[in-house]
Image: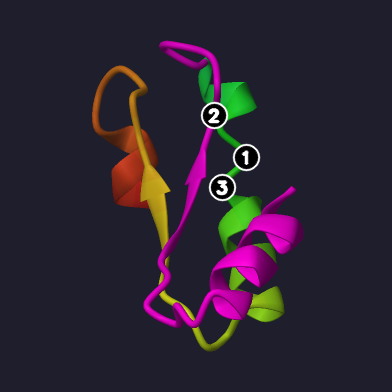
Amino acid sequence: EIEKEVKKMEDAGNNQIAILHCVATYPPEDSDVNLNNIKTLMSIYPEYPIGFSDHSTGIISSVII
């Protein structure tokens, strides 16, 4: 899904893209956050900033990054 959407934006001439890792559950369990996805996204899309859209409880997820 990410690859498809990034390609759509690039094909439309948009190269100002930021990709955010986000978990669909609200709030997610710590075990579901899977912050390793950020490293994976960074390796696949090194030309774009990668971030974390967090709605977990507490600050631990955002501090770990």
Question: What stretch of residues is rendered in magenta?
Answer: 1-28
Asked which secondary structure carries label 1, the reply is loop
Whether the residues at callouts 1 and 3 have beta carbons within 8 Å, the answer is yes
Give the percent coordinates (x, y) of residue 11.
63, 78
Depicted 35 relative to depicted 18: above or below? above
Say which mark, if any, is on residue 23: 2
Residue at the front extreme, as displayed: 12
Q: Is residue 52 left or right of residue 57?
A: right
Residue in the foreground of this view, choosing between 43 and 36: 43
Q: Quadrant of residue 14?
A: bottom left
Asked which secondary structure carries label 3, the reply is loop
Residue at the bottom extreme, as displayed: 47
**Mark 1, residue position:** 34
Give the percent coordinates (x, y) of residue 27.
41, 12
Give the percent coordinates (x, y) of residue 59.
24, 33
Q: Amino acid at mark 1?
A: Asn
Residue at the top extreme, as displayed: 26
Residue 3 in sight here = yes
- Residues at marks 2 and 1, CA–CA distance in whole angstroms: 8 Å
**Mark 3, residue position:** 35
